[in-house]
Image: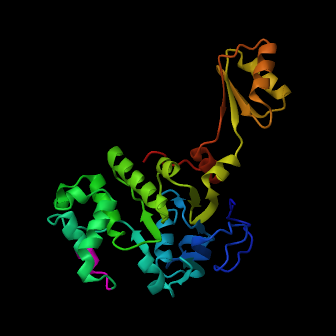
Amino acid sequence: MTTMTGEGAPEAASPRGAPAGASTEPASILSRGLTKRFAGGQVAVDDLHLTVPRGSVFGFLGPNGSGKTTTIRMLLGLVQPTSGACEVLGRPMPAGLSEALPKVGALVEGPAFYPYLSGEANLRRYDAADPLADPRTVGARVGAALDRVGLGAAAGKRYRAYSLGMRQRLAIAATLLGPRELLVLDEPTNGLDPQGTREVRSLIKEIAADGTTVFVSSHLLAEVAQMCSHIGVMRAGRLVAQGPIAELTAGHAARLRVETPHAARAAAVLDRLELAGVRAADGEVSAEIGGVPPERVCAELVGAGVAVRGLAVLRPSLEEVFVDLTGEGFDVDG
């Protein structure tokens, strides 16, 4: 179920249960009233009630500075919240860090790799830093992680010779050195060229298809629209909406667009049919289609002597939903 939050949000339940009005399906991440206020009074995250369903690809959307990275740091126990509570994989944070984090792979602001070492050698260094990793099986873990991200053939290649997409895939491989139930990726396609972006997007979909929950923070709306099943929308530190993308877009009215040289007459017909939000421009008129069949609208227009050059029903895009929710523009392509 789609959950709308923000001013006037209902009182939430404890983090062990989903916040009021949220989905009751099992969640990989739950938060209740999560807030972070920095010295000087700046509120980076304000009263966050977040539910990330298990098995979803969850896009955490918002412009830069909207509180996404601070939220991730609180979820991973890297930053202490000012108030509120959260759970990751059913464990309260930060008290349950030792139990939850071995099942979580996280990429926050990118790992630092040694340019003169190969991809394999860099992953071996990361693996050695894990106190729970068995050094006797490091080769198998590193090999499996490289194969998982499609870098098995480039294992011996120096990092400095990797493309941008390969570097980001290696970073994701570093999060997959053990079995993971949850993957947290902060801006995984930021700065990549189109090819690198496609590579990372495809990889995220493959990881999710294996049953891992993937939590993707991004300011690139087009990327989120192509790879995520659910989204949460942040604005100025507050979560203004969350839920399945299909439900969020379905809750916004589709519009009928008519291309015609008789815009004024067409607008009068749409008004007579009681369509809402009629807008007329040079060569075009549009309105919310509501429950009126488009074929009836076409017949009425033709019957009124309106020349119809084109007629289309436009479903709301994720960009339009975001603008409607926040009143702001968005970085659609990066």
Q: Position of residue 16 (x, y in %)?
A: 64, 80
Q: Position of residue 121 (x, y in %)?
A: 19, 69
Query: 333 above or below 143?
Result: above
Looking at the image, which residue is at 68% across and 64% down? 5
Q: Nearer the viewer, residue 212 or 312?
A: 212
Q: Is residue 255 magenta?
A: no
Q: Nearer the viewer, residue 148 or 128?
A: 148
Q: How is the image coloured?
A: rainbow
Query: 95 above or below 199?
Result: below
Question: Image quadrant of residue 49?
Answer: bottom right
- Quadrant location, the N terminus: bottom right
Looking at the image, which residue is at 72% across and 71% down? 20
Q: Position of residue 243 (x, y in %)?
A: 63, 59
Question: Image quadrant of residue 3?
Answer: bottom right
Residue 304 appears in the picture as rendered: no
Q: Nearer the viewer, residue 198 or 207?
A: 207
Residue 301 appears in the picture as rendered: yes
Q: Nearer the viewer, residue 5 or 224?
A: 224
Looking at the image, which residue is at 27% across and 58% down? 167
Query: 326 above or below 65?
Result: above
Q: Position of residue 188 (x, y in %)?
A: 39, 58
Q: Which residues are magenta?
A: 125-131
Looking at the image, which residue is at 37% across and 66% down? 109
Query: 184 above or below 301?
Result: below
Q: Residue furthest bottom?
A: 95
Q: Is residue 130 magenta?
A: yes
Residue 214 relative to residue 296: left or right:
left
Residue 100 relative to residue 189: left or right:
right
Q: Residue furthest left?
A: 116
Residue 320 relative to residue 71: left or right:
right
